[in-house]
Amino acid sequence: MTFLLELLVSVLIVAGAAFLLIGSIGMVKLPDLLSRLHAPTKATTLGVGGALVASMVYFGGLEGELSIHEVLITGFLFMTAPISAHFIAKAHLHEHTKLRDGLPPSGRPLGWSTFDVAPGGDEGEHADDQQGGHR
Amino acid sequence: MIEYALQFGFVAVLLALLLNLWRLMRGPSLMDRVLAVDTMVINIIALIILFGIEQRSKMFFEGALLFAMFGFISTVAYCRFVLRGDVIE
């Protein structure tokens, strides 16, 4: 039983570290920022989740003291990673106005959400919320 | 067996941190650097947790949680600054 738990912890640690490394390699190798955003957001979050589950199994199964901290960190990271990726993508689109040239029409009276004014937003400001435009 | 897995984990996370540092120094645009620092924070959280397993101590989780919170808040604050020109309106 102890051997199985140790095997499980080792496999989780190795898998998590491999995912972290793959995410960072992807961030170096991919060509531009909007595709570079995928690697840290997905693979790295999964990797740190693996390390946290390994720590939970280690302290709960082998040391005999259950710990809940990891669930807190995992939940926090899994909630915040999409938000920060979304913010980074929006700021990138905001910086590079050339990107809006290749866009197809949105098919609505309003334009795309990052580039156009939201309905009911202030004039002349870029829309900062999700209403209006394509999701 | 866990010791070998931990050594592999430390080496992998350190390589990942070096790659992030390369992207941080090289990064063509501003958001690349922000993304590099965000990934670096996540890698450091994993490093702290692996170190906690190696030391058999649960003392490090608070540090990891603080790193997670500060990383998220700094990323969002920087993007907000780029988007709006101000962090708190």
Image (cartoon, coloured by chain):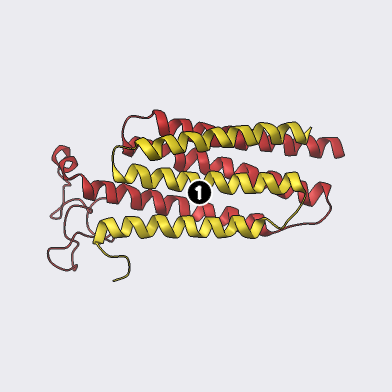
> Where is residue A22 drawn, in percent x and y?
51, 31
Question: In the image, what residue type sits under mark 1?
Answer: Val
> Where is residue B57 drawn, in percent x and y?
75, 53
Pinpoint the chain carrying mark 1.
B
The residue lying toward the viewer, choosing from A101 and A105, is A101
The residue lying toward the viewer, choosing from A102 and B27, is B27
Relative horizontal placement of residue A85, taking residue A107 as reference (left or right): right
Q: Residue at x 49, y 44 (%)?
A: B40
Relative horizontal placement of residue A9, taking residue B82 as reference (left or right): right
The local secondary structure at tag 1 comes to helix
Relative horizontal placement of residue B59, taking residue A18 as reference (left or right): right
Q: Residue at x 67, y 37 (%)?
A: A13
Q: Residue at x 76, y 35 (%)?
A: B3
Which chain is rendered red in the image? A
Q: Which residue is mark 1?
A: B41
Inspect this view and state whether residue A97 appears.
yes
> Where is residue B46 drawn, in percent x and y?
60, 45
Q: Colour of chain B?
A: yellow
When the figure is inspected, residue A123 is found, relative to residue B9, above or below; the finding is below
The residue lying toward the viewer, choosing from A127 and B21, is B21
Q: Residue furthest bottom?
A: B89
Q: Residue furthest right?
A: A1
Q: Quadrant of the N terminus of chain A?
A: top right
